[in-house]
Image (cartoon, rainbow, N blue to C red):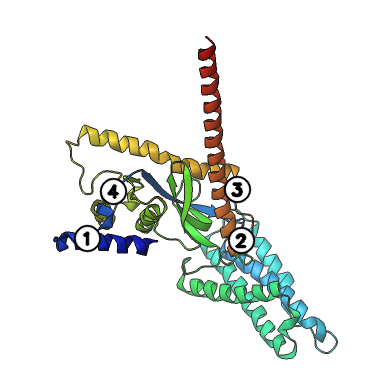
Amino acid sequence: MEEQIQTDDQDNDEGNDSSINKTQTDNNDFDTKENRGKLILDATCAPADISYPTDFKLLNEAREKLEHIIDVLHKPLNGTRKKPRTYRNRARKEYLSIAKQRNIRSKKMRKAVGKQLRYVKRNLEIVQQLTLESSLSLLSKHEYRQLLVIQELYRQQKEMYRAKTHRIDDRIVSISQPHVRPIVRGKAKANVEFGSKVAISVVNGYAMVEHLSWDNFNEGLTLQKSVENYRKRYGYYPEAVLADKIYRTRDKLKYCKERGIRLSGPRLGRPSKEEDYIQKQLTKIDASERNEVEGKFGTGKRSYGLGLIQVCLEKTSETVVCLQFLVMNLERRLKVLLCNFFRERIQRLISQMTFCM
């Protein structure tokens, strides 16, 4: 359809003498259409249903799961080979002695993490030895997946322990949900959340998921994609984009200026003392209208379960997040239809009463 429209426009312009104007209009189609509507952008985190992860706690959980895997692999060899020693009782006591304390010094915690690392390393070596005599086919699909995750978890924890840091790329914070990543948000309630990050756009009360990722990303980079998606949906660019300061970069301002889009917020650079009164009022109105997207996040997290995603699989979690916004849009549409229905009924009643009088 779009190719047919472009060919028709080219055929109509063949008779014109101004070829320069023709090439300019072909390259800048956004200049020929009037901008309408407002686009509100923001991002949030959809936390997963996992306990707060710590290195000490993750290593203890990995050790316990490896002990179960060792029991499964050694079961066929119970009569021919002595069960390898894993020191599970000693490791459990050492874990509880630290976990029950409230205030733990950093040196003491580092020593405890080092012990748990050595227990996990020993168990991984035992599993590798057992695979020479037994078969990994004895493990279920879930247990085999846990074994692969624990191997990567041990590599990450060992590297962070040697470097004396708590940051690493693609860090695993849950053995049951290895796709979950820490999302640094800097909020007052929680500085770090664990789940997926969702960037949405709101137009006329309807929320659209623009980008969803388990890795942390800069939501300011989604502005161009969101604006282009707006044009595909409605056929024209928005009149204004209401967003945070993180969206206001020089590249984004230039992109919006070329398309006649007003990006909310003050101008870049040092604020002027003689700022226009109209600009102040416009900024205040934009800030109040941008509260709508915060209301969407609040409604989704309080009423629709966006505040805690209680499914485990990666694709299922993404589907649940998108379905929650879909249900919110359906409820919004239902409210609009009901308002229009009652408005028509009231107008009919008023017209009948005036006719009878």
Number of residue marks: 4
Q: Is mark 1 on a helix, strand or loop?
A: loop
Quickly name the residue at label 2: 316
Measure the alpha-carbon separation of dots 3 and 1. 54 Å
Q: Are marks 2 and 4 in contact (CB under 8 Å)?
A: no
What residue is disc 3 on? Answer: 305
Between disc 1 and disc 4, the foreground one is 1
Q: In this view, does 223 lie to the left or right of 96?
A: left
Label 4 element class: loop
- The answer to which of 75 and 344 lies nearer the viewer is 344
- N-term mark: 1 or 2: 1
Quarter holding residue 194: bottom right
Residue 262 appears left or right of 221: left
The kind of residue tagged 2 is Thr
Who's the residue at 52% across and 65% down the image?
107
Residue 356 against residue 128 in the figure, above or below: above
